[in-house]
Image (tube, rainbow, N blue to C red):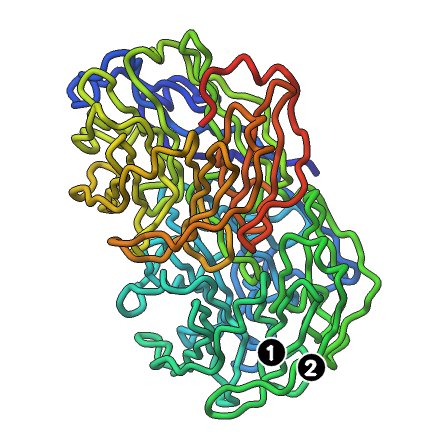
Amino acid sequence: MSHTFRRAGRRTAVCAALGCAGLLVVGALSGTAAADAPGVPGQVARPAPSAPVPTFTIPGRSAHTKSARITGKAVPRDAAATAAHPSDFDGDGADDLVYRLSGGDVLLYLGGSTYYDVISYDTSQVKDLLTPGDLTGDGKPDLLTLTASGQLRLHSGANPLQDNGLASYTTIGASGWQQYSKVIAPGDLNGDGRPDLLARSTAGLFFYPGTGDAAKPFGARVQIGGAGWNQYNQLVGVGDFDGDGIGDVIARNADGLWLYSGNGSATAGFKSKTQIGGTGWGQYNQVIGGGDYDANGTHDLLARSYDGTLYFYEGNGNGTFDPTRQEIGAPWGDVTQFAGGGANPAYGKNGIFANTPGGDLYYYDGTGTGTLTAKTSIGGGWDRTAVRLYHVSSLRDDGISDLIGQGLADGHLYNFGAYADDELAGGSTAYNLLVGPGDLNGDGKGDLLARSSGGLYFYAGNGDGNSMKSRVQVGGSGWSQYNSIVGAGDLNGDGRADIVARSSAGLFLYTGTGNATSPFAARKQIGGTGWSQYNKLIAPGDINGDGVADLLARSSSGLFFYPGTGTGTFGARVQIGGTGWSQYADLI
C-alpha cells in the first residue's frame, strides 16, 4: 500500500491558508524590524514536499500475533521481556522502528502499513533518539531523545499507538549532553537487570548505570574507555547480541565491524573485541541495532545503504549473524536518524537555497542519498542589490535551518524564518561574508561567524533564533585571504561544527574546538589549487544520510557533490547537476 507523508517544516496561519506546497513567502513583514529591510517580500517557511513513507518486509515477522494492532493498546510485559524487546511498542514480540524524518517528525513504524506520527514536527526538538526499554516501571518500552542544546528527555511509552503518542516528556537531570558526539542504549551492561547508557566524547567512553528510578533513571557517569573510541564512525547499542544476558556494543571503523561483548562487571567493561564483519560494511550510511526484528528470540542488525535501501541481518544469538543480507524495503533515504542507529546525528541543515539574478528564490532539499530534490519556488522579489542572503544551520532546537539576510544599506542582520519577529543582530555594513556552521562554543546553540576586511567575528546564539549575543573578535585580517568560507555541521567525526575555507592556494579545514574565544584549531590543507575551478562552494549539511557534513561545488560544467568522510576530508566528487545550475547568482 502506498503512503505519502508530509515532510513538514515551519508553519503559520497564512501558510496554512495558502496550502503551502513548499517553502513559500507567507506574509509581509509589517510590524517587524525585518519589514524595514528593503528588497524583502516576506517571511518564509521551510518546504513540505510529499515523501513516501518507507516500509519493510522482514521474513517471519508477519507470522506473529498482532493483537496490539487490533486493540490499539500496547501490552505490558515483565522486565525480562521488555529488556529483550526494547522497542516493541505494540507488544507483539517483534521490535519496531522509531525514526526522525528530515522535517522533524518522529514516526513509530510497526511494519506493514501501520505507523504513527508519535512526535510531530511542530513540537519536535529531536536530534537523536534511543530505545532503552522500560525506564518508568510500567512494563512498556519508553523512548529517550536528545536535543541539540543538550537535554535528555524521557518519553513514556504508556500509550504510543496514536499520533503524538510519545510527544509528552520529562527532562532527565540538567543539560550538558551536547558534549557527546554519540549516546547509545546498549541494554544492561553491569548485570543488575536495568538498562544503561553509554556516551562518547572526544575524551573517551562514559558509562551511565541504570538506577531503576523513573525520576532519576541513570547514575553518575564512569569513564570506561579512552579516546580510541573516536575511531568508530558507527557506534551501536545492540542489547544482548551474544546470548549471555549482558548488553553488547557493535562498532564500525574503516577496517570493518567489531563486537564488544559486555562483561557484566560493576564498571561495565567489555571483553576483548571480536571482528564480525569486513570492509564491506562501509557501504552503509546507517547501522541499526538493539532489536529482535523478526521475533525469533535473537537480536538482529539492520543496515541502510547510500541509495536508501534497508537490509536485514538475522542475529544467531551467539555474537554473530547470518552473513546473507536480505533486502527488506526502500526508500529510506528521508530518515535522518534511527533509534538505535550508529551514526553521529547530523542536525540543523540539509538542503540549499538558490537565487536568480532577478531575485527569484528556490529551495532544494537533500534526499539522504547524495542528491537534491526538485526545486520548490519560494517566490520573487528578493532584491540582491538591497539584501544579501545567507542560509545557516538552525538557530533553534528544532533543527530547521534559517534564512538570514544582511541589509546592504544598514548592515543589520534579519532572520526571515516564519517564526522570527525581530532583528537578529545589529551587524555591520563592513561584513562581506556570514557563516552559520552550527554550535561553535559547545553550548548546543547555533552560532554565527561574520567577516570584514579587519577580521573574523563570533556571534554566540541564544537558542531562540531572534537574537544573538554580542560579537567577539576571533580572527584578524588574515581571514580576508579566503574567497569562500562555508560550513554546516561536523566534518571530522568529533561532533563539533567545522568550516572549510578556500584561497588561491587551495582548500583548508578548520576543525571546531568548542571554545568561544578560540573556536577553531590550526588550519589543515585538504585540497589544492584545483578547487579554484569552482565559482561557488556550498555547505548543504548532511545530504547522504551518514551523519557527516558534505560539500557542493559549482563550475561552468554543473553541480558536484563531495561526500564528507568523517575524517576531515571529502570523497571523490559526483556530478549531480548540469549547466542549468549556472542560472543562479547565489547558491547558499
Could you tell me how far apart the alpha carbons at marks 2 and 1 are, in whole angstroms?
8 Å
- Image position of 544 with respect to 201: above or below: above
Q: Does residue 256 show up? A: yes
Q: Is residue 339 left or right of residue 65?
A: left
Helix, strand or loop status at disc 1: strand
Q: Residue at x 51, y 34 (%)?
A: 6
Type of amino acid at the residue the image marks with label 1: Asp
Q: Nearer the viewer, residue 503 or 468?
A: 503
- Image position of 198 with respect to 582: above or below: below
Q: Classify residue 412 by image quadrant.
A: top left
Percent of width and height locating residue 336: 54, 47
Q: Nearer the viewer, residue 570 or 525?
A: 525
Residue furthest to the right: 324
Q: Is residue 219 left or right of residue 284?
A: left
N-terminal of the pair, mark 2 or mark 1, is 2
User: Residue 248's mark?
Assistant: 1
Q: Is residue 560 left or right of residue 583?
A: right
Helix, strand or loop status at disc 2: loop
User: Residue 163's mark?
Assistant: none
Q: Residue at x 38, y 27 (%)?
A: 45
Q: Residue at x 29, y 64 (%)?
A: 175
Q: Is residue 209 left or right of residue 262?
A: left
Dot 1, crowdedness within 10 Å: few (<14), some or many (≥20)? many
Which image quadrant: the C terminus?
A: top left
Type of amino acid at the residue the image marks with label 2: Asp
Dot 2, crowdedness within 10 Å: few (<14), some or many (≥20)? many
User: Residue 242's mark?
Assistant: 2
Q: Are marks 2 and 1 in contact (CB under 8 Å)?
A: yes
Residue furthest to the top: 358
- Image position of 581 with respect to 456: above or below: above
Q: Nearer the viewer, residue 452 or 270?
A: 452
